[in-house]
């Protein structure tokens, strides 16, 4: 897809489709009014006959509108004008994209950037429209034997602006959103691949390919023997039952002076999680191929910031392995020693994500980071707590939590600040080791974050539990690409704060 900003009125556009909005009650947006005037009230006549009510997310496609050079005009319902805010805009732009991409239009001009969205500017409107275009056109069909029928045609998208010239924020938003969209696509593709293809070695090859494509990236892949030397007994305890070798992938993005300390992103990369000896139920176990979506989001975010050319240093660390049952697998009751020197009693081998993350978080300290954010499909308890709308956000510093929440609100990639109070820590006490890897059913997502906090006391740290947001189940099963928008926007904000 190609995106650009177009200056000029809608009635003058020679293109495959012009897209304008209609509020409930037949109230035309500014762009729709211009079309209607040029078309001698054709649009208002159609609305008066009841073919378009303006109800939110409804659409009406028109052909051969009088005095309009565009081949098509797409009317999109915006709902009540007095209630038009972010949610209404998102629903409407998604409906517009769904209809647009079912047409044969090879190019389109959308007059949505100037819509009066409460609390949002045109740069935000453009960004969300780009995300909607990527979401609408995304298909994962590379493993199907036959090509998809009625495949959507490629379409060049232009964002029409009625007033003045395009501003630097609008152009920057367009570039950034397109890069984030591509990063989300990479994240989705990796998440949707089955575990027999997307192995730890496959993820390592993808990281190498990403570094080859971008000179600003440097990749290092540690093997199990290297992890043994580093004392990563916790991470290695998870991979013991698998024939697939574990990898510790490091991608270093240098966008500014090498003396500037980096932000580190740590992504959980369990490419298939059977639960190990604490075997999961068989129903929906296929979805455990998504247990590497934290790793995928780190790769997607690094690709996005490399495309943007962000003036910041960022390190991505991906501990990746399988969690499988076998005669050599770790058993409940086993005690292992982490890289930090802390001993861990493993009461449940299905609480493995924290076991690989804790060693990666200890390893992160070698980069002397300003901030560390880990991203993981960590707990089913987070899904129970927050559903599939918001990612769970934990942090050892409230200011960092607020920075991430701000990015989540900007991108509509929602997160919710969860407690990380000392009162929860005793649930992790062990009779036989320094810490046990589960804290019982009560507050399961919180105690998982408390476990990780034991390994992050020397730097500013946040944890994103994306178990409920990284993929969808059921009929729409598939990876979502979250939280690439949140993470990338956070990094963009870090650069802007320093300038």
Image (cartoon, rainbow, N blue to C red):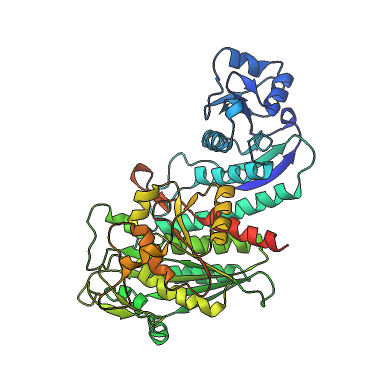
Vertical relation: 441 (above or below) 362: above
The residue located at (63%, 21%) in the rendering is 27
- Residue 22, percent from left and from top: 61, 25
The residue located at (33%, 67%) in the rendering is 426
The residue located at (56%, 46%) in the rendering is 131
The answer to whether residue 429 is seen in the rendering is: yes
- Residue 212, percent from left and from top: 57, 71
Q: Is residue 491 left or right of residue 184?
A: right
- Residue 308, percent from left and from top: 65, 60
| Residue furthest right in the image | 164
The answer to whether residue 378 is seen in the rendering is: no
Q: Is residue 188 left or right of residue 196?
A: right
Q: Quadrant of residue 44?
A: top right
| Residue furthest bottom in the image | 229
Name the one closer to the observer, 402 or 489. 402
Count of numbered tags: 0
The residue located at (51%, 36%) in the rendering is 98
Vertical relation: 473 (above or below) 494: above
Quadrant for the C terminus in the image: bottom right
- Residue 54, percent from left and from top: 56, 23
Q: Quadrant of residue 352?
A: bottom left
Q: Quadrant of residue 166?
A: top right
Q: Is residue 238 left or right of residue 393?
A: left
| Residue furthest left in the image | 327
Name the one closer to the observer, 453 or 467. 453
């Amino acid at each position: 897809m190609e995106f650009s900003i177009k200056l000029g009125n809608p009635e003058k556009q020679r293109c495959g489709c012009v897209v304008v909005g209609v509020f409930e009650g037949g109230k035309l947006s500014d762009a729709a009014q211009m079309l209607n005037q040029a078309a001698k009230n054709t649009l208002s006549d159609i609305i008066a006959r009841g073919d378009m009510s303006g109800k939110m997310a409804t659409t009406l496609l028109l052909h051969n509108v009088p005095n309009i050079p565009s081949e098509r005009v797409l009317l999109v319902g915006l709902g009540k004008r007095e209630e038009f805010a972010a949610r209404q805009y998102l629903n409407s732009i998604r409906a517009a994209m769904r209809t647009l991409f079912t047409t044969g239009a090879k190019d389109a001009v959308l007059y949505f950037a100037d819509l009066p969205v409460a609390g949002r500017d045109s740069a935000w409107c453009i960004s969300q429209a780009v995300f909607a275009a990527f979401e609408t056109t995304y298909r994962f069909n590379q493993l199907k034997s036959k090509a998809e029928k009625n495949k959507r045609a490629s379409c060049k998208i232009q964002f029409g602006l009625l007033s003045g010239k395009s501003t630097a924020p609008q152009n920057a938003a367009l570039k950034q959103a397109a890069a984030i969209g591509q990063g989300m696509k990479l994240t989705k593709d990796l998440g949707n691949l089955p575990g027999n293809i997307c192995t730890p070695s496959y993820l390592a090859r993808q990281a190498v390919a990403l570094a080859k494509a971008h000179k600003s990236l440097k990749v290092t892949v540690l093997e199990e023997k290297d992890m043994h030397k580093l004392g990563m007994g916790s991470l290695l305890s998870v991979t013991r039952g698998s024939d697939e070798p574990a990898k510790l992938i490091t991608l270093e993005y240098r966008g500014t002076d090498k003396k500037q300390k980096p932000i580190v992103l740590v992504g959980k990369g369990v490419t298939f999680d059977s639960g190990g000896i604490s075997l999961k139920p068989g129903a929906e176990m296929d979805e455990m191929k998504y247990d590497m979506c934290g790793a995928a989001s780190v790769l997607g975010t690094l690709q996005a910031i490399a495309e943007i050319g962000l003036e910041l240093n960022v390190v991505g660390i991906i501990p990746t392995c399988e969690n499988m049952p076998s005669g050599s697998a770790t058993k409940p009751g086993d005690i292992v020693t982490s890289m930090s020197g802390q001993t861990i009693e493993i009461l449940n081998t299905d609480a493995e994500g924290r076991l690989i993350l804790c060693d990666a978080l200890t390893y992160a300290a070698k980069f002397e980071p300003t901030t560390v954010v880990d991203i993981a499909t960590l707990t089913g308890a987070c899904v129970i707590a927050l559903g599939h709308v918001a990612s769970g956000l934990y942090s050892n510093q409230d200011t960092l939590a607020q920075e991430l929440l701000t990015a989540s609100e900007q991108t509509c990639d929602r997160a919710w600040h969860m407690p990380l109070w000392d009162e929860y820590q005793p649930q992790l006490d062990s009779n036989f080791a320094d810490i046990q890897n589960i804290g019982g059913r009560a507050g399961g997502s919180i105690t998982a974050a408390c476990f990780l906090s034991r390994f992050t006391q020397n730097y500013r740290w946040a944890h994103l539990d994306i178990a409920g947001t990284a993929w969808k189940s059921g009929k729409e099963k598939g990876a979502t690409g979250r939280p690439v928008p949140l993470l990338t926007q956070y990094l963009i904000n870090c650069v802007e704060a320093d300038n």
